[in-house]
Amino acid sequence: PVLKTTFADPSIIQVNKTYYSFATAGPGIYGIQIAKSDDFHKWEHLKHDALPHTGTWVNHAAGRGSGVAPDVQQMADGSFVLYYTACINKQTPHKNTKCVGAATSKTIEGPYTPEAAPLACHLSQGGAIDISGFHDPTTHDQYVLYKVDGNNAGHGGLCMNMIPPIQATPIMLQKVTPNGLTAIGTPIQILDRDDTDGPLVEAPMLRKYGNKYVLFFSSNCFSSPGYDVSYAVADNITGPYRKASEPLFAYGKLGLDGPGGASVTTDGSKMVFHGHYSVKGQGMTRVLYTQEIKFDG
């Protein structure tokens, strides 16, 4: 690992010559953590919170549910949008139901100012989590992707979704306005779990390599060693997406334990993800790993 501290669900963005990674809360940071690197190898863990205040829709009593799994995008005007997941502060059919929302800043390190309303919720299906942004370099359209949190409405077992009836956990693609903040039309399902994925698919991240759209995602359960980094490929942004025959990173590969939550730079060459690792004073936790990647088509 490049950071030996809790740094789960990392995202990555390159701004000028500096790489920034944003992650779920950790020791001493209530909201969103930040780390940065000038060379992608040595990382500095910053001490301030990128999202000190979440939207008014968030249930702040949920503690560290207040802002998780962040993703940051730079928009055409140079400003930044931070997407995040948080528990909603209203009665829902299922416990700890989460929605996905956005916050904005003129500078990469923030602090980010939250939008008043969430972007997506799917309350009757268990909620929405793991939002990420995507700018299509061909059409210049702006999108977000997220997971419908069906296993939150599940019936038990690993990640609450291994006892029948098994709930769907679809990955959704939603077109948004150029500023990344408002949905246009209705979302489209582009992937879902099957039996090889265990209880779920989640953590979607879309990139374009040549004329192929590559959808990175995780399957199995984040708390288990079997969590992974997988991918699926399509000719069109709306699919159909064909899952690869085996994960990119999985338990035992390169000595990894529970790798997942991957994010890739806009140019598609550098990836960050988390994996389980024993940290002194923190026990077994999820820490930051990096990897240079190449897609051969």
Image (cartoon, rainbow, N blue to C red):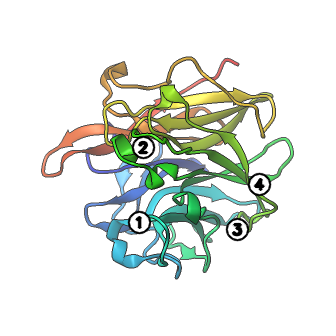
Where, quadrant-wise, is the N terminus in this rendering? top left
Where, quadrant-wise, is the C terminus in this rendering? top right
Please tell me whether mark 2 sits on a helix, a strand or a loop: loop
Three-letter amino acid code at the position of disc 1: Asn
Instruction: From the top left corner, tell me how far across and down residue 291 is, in percent.
Output: 46, 30
Please tell me whether mark 3 sits on a helix, a strand or a loop: loop
Could you tell which of marks 3 and 4 lies nearer the N-terminus? Answer: 4
> Do residues under tags 4 and 2 come within 8 Å of each other at their CB atoms?
no
Q: Mark 4 points at which residue?
A: 142
Q: Please give the name of the residue rendered at 86% of the width and 46% of the height, measured from the top-left corner.
A: 139
Mark linked to residue 181? 3
Instruction: From the top left corner, tell me how far across and down residue 24 is, in percent.
Output: 40, 57
Could you tell which of marks 3 and 1 lies nearer the N-terminus? Answer: 1
Q: Name the residue under label 1.
A: 96
Query: Could you say which is closer to the camera, residue 228 or residue 286?
Result: 228
Could you tell which of marks 4 and 1 lies nearer the N-terminus? Answer: 1
Could you tell which of marks 2 and 1 lies nearer the N-terminus? Answer: 1
Residues packed near mark 4 inside 10 Å, few (<14), some (14 to 19) or many (20 plus)? many
Q: How far apart in space, not on screen, are marks 3 and 4 (Cα)? A: 10 Å
